[in-house]
Structure formats: C-alpha cells, structure tokens
Image (cartoon, grey):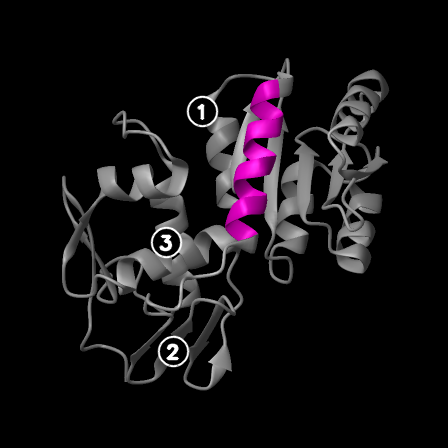
Amino acid sequence: MNENPPHILIVEDDIELGQWMKDYLSSKDYRVTLCERGDEAVEIIEQQHPDIVVLDGMLPGLDGFDVCKAVRPTFSNAIIMVTARDEEIDEVLGLEMGADDYLTKPVRARALLTRIRKYLQRQTDVAPTSEQTRLTFNNLEIDKPAMLTVLNGVEIKLSSNEFEVLWLLAAQAGQLVTREDLVHQLRGFDYDGFDRSIDLRISRLRKKLGDDPTKPYRIKTVWGKGYLFATDVWS
C-alpha cells in the first residue's frame, strides 16, 4: 500500500453516490475525503489542497460551478465536474469556471478512475533532462518542471491544464498548432469537431496573460485550423 496516497476530495450531496465513490476509490488505495456542501468544499480545498477534486454541479450551500470559480485562482490541481444531465451547457459552464474535465451521471467506475489516474499522472510528470524545460520570451518566463509562469516579474496563477496548453503552444512558438493536435495531446483522443474545452482554456489563458479577447495578438487564432503563439509581443 502507498504510504502517502494521493488525496481525492469528493463533493457530492447524494449520500449513496458519494459513499460509493469513496469506497471504490479507497479500495484503489487513494485517501478520500467526502463532503456534501459546496461552502465546506471551498474550506477543505483551501486548507488541505487535495490532489484531485471530484465536484458535483448541484450542491447545497454553494453550487459546484461557484465552488470551482472560488478556488480556481489559488488551486492548480485538477477539478473533475460531475453533472446530472448530458447537456453541453453544463460542460461549457464548468470549463468556463475552471474545471479540467467532466463526467455525467450515472458515474461509471472505470471512467472515474481513468480520469483520476490521467490527471494525477500529469501533475506528477517530470520532464526528462534532455527535453527543454524552460522558455523565455522577453518579459515572459515559463518553467515546466515548476509549472511556473512569470509575466513582467509577476507570477501568473494557472491551472495544470491551462499551463499545459501554454507550454504546448509556447514550445512551438511561431508555428501553427492545430486543434486536432492540441486535443490529442491534452485529452488523449482524436478531435471529433465538437470539443470545446480547448477553446475555453485558450480564452482563460488570454485573459490571464493580458491578451486582447476581441483581437488576440499573443495567442492568435488561425480560423478553421488552430492557434499560434506569437514570439515578438512579450515586452
């Protein structure tokens, strides 16, 4: 058994479902905390900084979307939203609030475990020494091992997924990176033409990096193709 198992926080007001997820993940050697209220979840996330948060959308005290919005400025680990309906509006809203992924009810054990393992792996990956680990563009510094982004001497707080998008684009600065490539590298499957998560992560990145949302010049959109990280605008 792992002496220091990853800490999973489950925020779910359906007591039966929450207990099932806790029992299942505990059987996989994770340390699991279960709470039923959104306001309590904010306190736990800020105080204990869990490795993964599995967050229901509809909660008493504070709904899951507001929880995500409240903690995201200081919490960089993965948040997996759980929604009751398979509707795009729930996915889009969750991603806009800073969620990394989402599951729809009924939650399947294999899907839950796969996502948790995927994000834990991303959060613990260490770049090989032969790979470039630091990028500098005038007043912008990006440190991959530390997952640190500094603009004009000020650290920019990014979620793990936002940082991953930034690194993938900056590592290919001046080159077109297609949406297909981004989806495949970030989510592990081929682009189906409907994935919105990449667009939303780019939108959040632009806002945090001071890019113009109406006419972006730092992370440019190449319509119908993908994105391009500009190299001559960081000053």
Q: Which residue is mark 3?
A: 165
Q: Which residue is mark 1?
A: 88
Left or right position of 40 against 45? right
* Numbered tag placed on residue 141 in the rendering: 2
- In this view, 198 is above or below 171: above
Name the residue located 33 percent from the left edge and 65 percent from the top edge.
131
- In this view, 119 is above or below 164: above
SS state under label 1:
helix
Instruction: Give the amino acid at mark 2.
Output: Glu
Instruction: Tell me if residue 137 is in the magenta stretch.
Output: no
Q: Residues within 10 Å of mark 3 (few under 14, many from 20)?
A: some
Name the residue located 26 percent from the left edge and 57 percent from the top edge.
214
Residue 194 visible in the displayed image: yes
Question: What stretch of residues is rendered in magenta?
Answer: 110-123
Left or right position of 9 against 196? right
Instruction: Give the amino acid at mark 3.
Output: Val
Rendering coords of residue 185 (x, y %) = 33, 43
Dominant SS of magenta comes to helix
Instruction: Tell me if residue 116 is in the magenta stretch.
Output: yes
* Numbered tag placed on residue 231 in the rendering: none
Instruction: Give the amino acid at mark 1.
Output: Glu
